[in-house]
Amino acid sequence: MTSNTFSRRQVLRYGAASAGAVAVAGAGATAAGATMTSGTASAAAAASRTVNGLPVPRSWTALPFDLDSVQLRPSIFTEKRDRMLAYARAYPADRILSNFRAAAGLDTRGAQPPGGWDDATGNLRGHYSGHLMSMLAQAWAGTGEAVFKDTLDEVVAGLQECQLAFDAKVGQPGTPPPPATWGTGRFGNGLVLSGDGQYVGLPDATIDGLHDFTISMWLNLHELRTWSRAFDFGTGTTSNMFLTIDAGSGPRFAITRTGGGGEQRINGTSRLETDRWTHLAVTMSGQVGTLYVDGAVAGTNTAMTLSPADLGAPKNNWIGRSQYGDAMLAGTVDDVTIHSRALAAAEIAQLVTTPGGGAGGDVAWYRFDETSGVTVGDSSGRSWDASMVTGEGGPAGPSHPGYLAAYPETQFIKLEQYVTYPAIWAPYYTCHKIMRGLLDAHTLTGNATALEVVRRMGEWVHSRLSTLPREQLDRMWALYIAGEYGGMNEVMADLYSLTGDERFMQTARCFDNTTLLADCAADRDTLEGKHANQHIPQFIGYLRVFEQGGDTSYREATRHFFDMVVPHRAYAHGGTGQGEVFRKRDVIAGTIVTTTNAESCAAYNMLKVARNLFFHAPDARFMDYYEKALVNQILASRQDADSTTDPLVNYMVPVGPGATRGYGNTGTCCGGTGLENHTKYQDSIYFRSPQDDVLWVNLYIPSTLTWSERAMTVTQTGDYPRSQSSTLTVTGSGRLDLRLRVPSWSGDGFTVAVNGQRQWVEVGSDGYARLLRSWRSGDRVTVTFPYAVRVEQALDDPSVQALLYGPVALIGKSQATSWLPVGLYGDLPLSGDLGAVVKPGTSPMTFETNGIRFEPFYLGNPEPYHAYVRRTEPTIVFAGQDSGVENRRDDDGRSFLDALWSLAPFKNKKAFERAVANTTATWTQAGLLTADEATTVRRAAASAPMRPA
């Protein structure tokens, strides 16, 4: 393993330089007959220029800097980062390794796994550990603190040990499933569920047609696993009803026909205890749902409109198993009753003291008095017997050396058989996170063992996929979530760039999602209905394939894909997707719901797409999007609170009326990407040309760039985005083309001064202001970019608008769950400056209008907010002068006042009156105003006391 005596910059260069040697040294371990280039290709890779430990593709016309070359200075970005670094410092290596060691048959050393989806039984376990590795690698590259590298080195060594343990099991047969275990129940016997693949399956029609109902059961929990199900009845993740033992702060009942975003919920108020018997019951009477814990009301919902009858004919009727593939229930179950009516509180109390409350359930009553077998008898008199599923037994050994995961190879085998989610859960997605974490450990910290482990994983992936026909691969990758593979094509192409092993490029192309790839290459938008984050990372991989010799269709597909998302499916904070899915093109307002817009993972990957497209064709529009998503969704996704035990990041960053952000997310996909988001803020502030003669300044984040190739540093000071200027100070000398991004929101106020003297600068077609000159130490460049209040209209409904201040999206603070009505035109001055009616608040970066307080989106708190408002200007009004004429909209949704004020600023009152006259003429010709109404509007304009500004 690489010694910590290397500096970060030495390691970032050393990491790639050593790659060729590692690949050649490992060549003897490759499969017989495998195609591998000679040392020439590896040597070429090793000799090429590197960035962050990876060879620079020849197709790049702009290059990033190594992470350790850019140091952040105090700002909101360091505030968010430092909170995440505290979490990283405290995270023990043994927890990261726990699930891997358990899967490989090694001692877990008493460590608990990360939890959430990465708990001991989840089908996605291992993915969060991969993100933790990437976080640690980025943290070390960004700070140089030994604790991050020490932990990461320990993890890598542990993973190599697990991989070798898997190697020893290659070809070994599996073992039969375990028998059912019957133990002491609450009343007699009970059924013990191990939490490892065991659950009870009820007959298909168990709850069909029920409206009012009661479901009750006794549980003795061995572990409190978040999202584990007491019961779950449904047809999959879209239509179901369930009771989870823990939703983070207590039990929760939910029922939905439209997935998680449409859930009607009853939330408990306190968490359940383990190692004691607890009675749970849910009743539904009309629209009133009640959750009981130990006979006491724990939660109610008086607006329940769904019942089991609305779910169709659920066939997945389970005790202890989730439709979503969440952690299995670990505990003993007893006395389950299902009733076709809502029991009264006194009857619930009787269930607590007497088996079945005396009479049991009329739909089903499972007493669990058996002592052997897998049949669970029904005591209701209906013979509605259930069955215990005892698990899959011991897995067979891997099919090929190099296998490494936190579970057996079973999920990969089932994917090749087209088994769907949630029976399996994206095995190649998890594989990608592990491989990416190992690659980052090598490229960012110089850990040579990490490259050896990930190289052997690549060989295993090649062994599984290289023999499959194209038709089978296409069908696998088309499966919803089960076929999600993250950026597997990216890591395989990166492995090729480091090793020269042609098998890895062959395998990268195995991940072509051919139908969507062809559609995007032809600029044919077929994104509607596709899972957003299942597909976004694929396009990062397509760019990598292009860079390593793939044809231009890979690059063009990625460029077109970006343009299909931005702006056509992007919200005002840069996020995309509703319910994790791409919706119809140009429908923004029509997709806004309260809780499930804008998955954080999608923003994480869209930033990568934008960044990598810039490398091929520098253009400010990519960085305009990058800025919007970074400053708003990404900053907002980390709570402004300290914790060393919880990442405190968002899954969704919603934009619906009265939305709140749910901070936490240990073990979820967005919990994982959130670890990385906040430890790499410096990665796109500056880019350079391959010849080191151009420096692009993309973001005005306070930072110091150390440009070793030019013996130059650039120090950027300010407090962006809380300030409206930035100063860059140069240390060193030489001729350099300095390019400063002119933000799309900055307008005519963008100015540049050098050493106090304002410069008349050319703005190139790439959207950057250019300063080509010979620089000397001490030269200071001051960039001013005044903020102004502006609105962003939803593409499908211009009356639905977001307020922004420069790059910062603003949110209205209100608990209301319907659109907040906001009018702005009635008091506008001739300048049309919205700042005249959206007044500064009592705190910096806050505003007041229409009685509503607005604050920056980036503030990380769980309070309800409105990212969009409803513009409500029913009549045509000028400076308080109400014409009484309806402010009608044209076929595009624009109102009369929208059309008029789009012409602002007005030089004087006469220019304003001419604009009113012209607009009334247009509206009259279109049949939107009568002649009399047009006259009334013109008179109102003439008499209005318009202010200049």
Image (tube, rainbow, N blue to C red):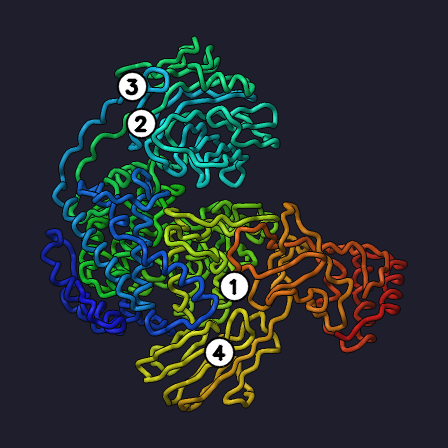
Residue at 48 percent of width and 82 percent of height: 770
Q: Which residue shows up at 44% across the image and 89% down it?
A: 773
C-alpha span from label 4 to label 2: 61 Å
Residue position marked by numbered label 2 in the rendering: 193
Distance CA(mark 2)–CA(mark 3): 12 Å
Question: Seen in the image, is 132 located left or right of residue 700?
Answer: left
Asked if labels 1 and 2 touch by Cβ distance under 8 angstroms, the answer is: no
- Could you tell whether 589 is left or right of 640 in the image? right
- Circle 1: residue type: Lys
Query: Disc 3 residue type?
Result: Val
For residue 628, the mark is 1
Nearer the camera: disc 2 or disc 3:
2
Cα separation between marks 1 and 3? 56 Å
**Residue 525 position in % (x across, y down):** 49, 53
Identify the residue under disc 4: 740
Looking at this view, is 294 or 881 the one in front?
294
Provide residue 793's location: percent of width, then percent of height.
63, 58
The quadrant of the picture occupied by the N terminus is bottom left
Asked whether disc 1 touches disc 3, contact meaning CB atoms under 8 Å apart, the reply is no
Of residues 674 and 383, the one drawn nearer to the viewer in this rendering:
674
Nearer to us: label 3 or label 4: 3
Residue 526 can be seen, yes or no: no
Whichever of callouts 2 and 3 sits on the residue coming sooner in the sequence is 2
Callout 4 touching callout 2 (CB < 8 Å): no
Q: Amino acid at mark 4?
A: Leu
The residues tagged by marks 2 and 1 sit, at their Cα atoms, a distance apart of 48 Å
Crowd band around label 3 with a 10 angstrom C-alpha radius: few (<14), some (14–19), many (20+): some
